[in-house]
Image (cartoon, grey):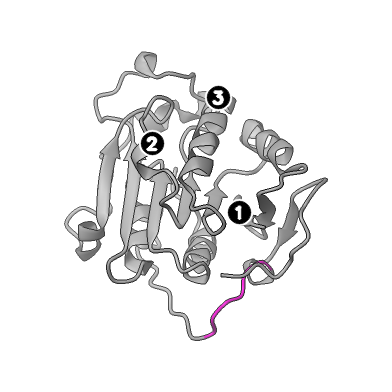
Amino acid sequence: MTANAASPVTKSIETRWVNQIFDIDPAAELRILCLDRVFGNIQPYELFALLTVVKACGAKTIFEIGTFNGRTTRNFAANVPAGGAVYTLDLQPDVEIEQMRFALDSQETPLVLREAVGSRYQGTPEQSRITQLFGDSGSFDFSPYHQTMDLVFVDGSHSLDYVRSDTENALKMAKPGSGVILWHDYGNEFPDVRQYLDDLAVGNDRFNFYHLLHTLMVVAVPQ
């Protein structure tokens, strides 16, 4: 995996097409499943862009923070190579909001009272590559996964405390020198996500940060 632009982003997060950031293999094939979506799922084009990154960086091990109904999870599992693995973390089904370490963004309460975690991948051929983990990402022990992930996708709670905590854990899980990190909901709807990532990108000496054009995703590519 090679980033086309070598110079670090120091003032702002540049917006680029995914193929302006990564060298894309013209022979690469994507499997895109479950194009139908509900509130809380990423848009179809975002799914295409996300899976293009998976292929471009040759991701074999993926960690997802925020399973929801497992639509993205299933697509990750469909696009990792043989022997690949997807780990995905979400809240226990019976969790009480008051038990969580940090406060949620006010828009997220309906998503906690959601359909069954992972329902979109359960009973599918892709399930064998998926390990479902349960817990509050603000207090979950990520240490067994440190420095082992080719790609980490952060799409949990969008409040500042959770974005910060999830990002700090993603940075620890990404393989040094090659692990890629993506975040969802970089937009006006969740200003904490935008502001936190804008600040993180300034002078960062480990990653170059890019906003993927026509998506709400930011990708961090190792320098």
Instruction: Determine the secondary structure under disc 3.
Output: helix
Circle 2 residues within 10 Å: few <14, some 14–19, many ≥20: few
Write down the quadrant of residue 1 in the picture. Answer: bottom right
Range of residues picked out in magenta: 21-26
**Numbered badge on residue 142:** 2
Whether residue 24 is in magenta: the answer is: yes
Taking the spot 76% from the left edge, 42% from the top edge, the residue there is 202
Taking the spot 77% from the left edge, 52% from the top edge, the residue there is 9
Instruction: Determine the secondary structure under disc 2.
Output: loop
**Numbered badge on residue 177:** none
- Inspect the image, locate mark 1, and give the three-letter code of the amino acid beneath it: Val
- Inspect the image, locate mark 3, and give the three-letter code of the amino acid beneath it: Asp
User: Can the viewer see residue 83?
Assistant: yes
Identify the mark nearer the N-term, 1 or 2.
Answer: 2
Whether residue 160 is in magenta: the answer is: no
Residue 61: x, y in percent? 38, 58
Which is more toward the observer, 135 or 41?
A: 135
Pointer 3 residue: 161
Q: Nearer the viewer, mark 1 or mark 2?
A: 2
Instruction: Determine the secondary structure under disc 1.
Output: strand
Taking the spot 40% from the left edge, 49% from the top edge, the residue there is 63
Q: Is residue 163 left or right of residue 119?
A: right
Identify the mark nearer the N-term, 1 or 3.
Answer: 3
**Numbered badge on residue 219:** 1
- Inspect the image, locate mark 2, and give the three-letter code of the amino acid beneath it: Phe
Which is more toward the observer, 122 or 83?
A: 83
**Mark 3 and mark 2 in contact (Cβ < 8 Å)?**
no
Residue 95: x, y in percent? 29, 23
Real-space Cα separation, disc 1 to disc 3, in angstroms: 20 Å
